[in-house]
Image (tube, rainbow, N blue to C red):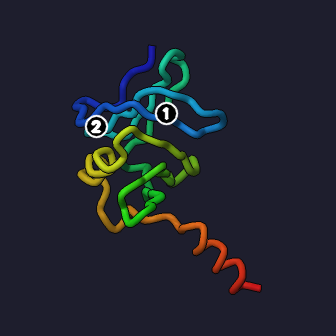
Amino acid sequence: MVKPLNTKVDLIMDGTSYLGLNDYGRLIVGDKGFEFYHKSDPRNYIQIPWEEVDYITASVLFGGRWIPRFGIQTKKNGFFTFAAKKPKKLLRAINQYIETDRMRHSLSFFEVLKRAICRH
């Protein structure tokens, strides 16, 4: 059995991890970090302590009305992508532990295209 990272849980929500194949499970925001636990396989989990988080990016569409997914960039282990049922609520809970200047909007499709054209 996996030992939970958090001692106090602020939010539990259904979500998806995009690490490899799509995994459905629970996203947990607590006092010590961010956790993902697979729905049926207890050995498939992700635990990210707040000290390890470098920044958070969110794909924001339609002026902030829809956030299809967000990502967590860690200092050592790379980039993890997740989706949540209510991403605004989840990102507000994360914002209690991560400073606002470390939470960013990801580039839109047209911004990526513009950068590619301008570089060549």
Q: Is residue 21 left or right of residue 48?
A: right
Q: How busy is the neighbourhood of tag 1: few (under 14 within 10 Å), some, or many (20 plus)?
A: some
Q: Secondary structure at mark 1?
A: strand
- Between 68 and 74, the one nearer to me in the picture: 68
- Between 29 and 88, the one nearer to me in the picture: 88
- Residue type, mark 1 in image: Ile
| Mark drawn on residue 1 | none
Q: Quadrant of residue 15?
A: top left
Residue at image position (66%, 37%) is 20
Q: Where is residue 84 shown, x and y percent of the image?
A: 41, 40
- Between 68 and 3, the one nearer to me in the picture: 68
| Mark drawn on residue 30 | 2
Q: Where is residue 60 shown, x and y percent of the image?
A: 44, 60
Instruction: Please give the residue where the numbered disc 1 appears in the rendered image.
Output: 46
Q: Is residue 30 left or right of residue 103?
A: left
- On the rendered image, what quadrant is the C terminus found in? bottom right
Q: Earlier in the sequence, mark 2 or mark 1?
A: 2
Q: Secondary structure at mark 2?
A: strand
Q: How busy is the neighbourhood of tag 2: few (under 14 within 10 Å), some, or many (20 plus)?
A: many
Outermost residue, right side: 120
Check the image and report above or below for 120 versus 15.
Answer: below
Q: Where is residue 35 shown, x and y percent of the image?
A: 41, 34
Check the image and report above or below for 4 versus 77.
Answer: above
Residue at image position (39%, 42%) is 49
Q: Quadrant of residue 95?
A: bottom left
Q: Where is residue 106 shown, x and y percent of the image?
A: 50, 64
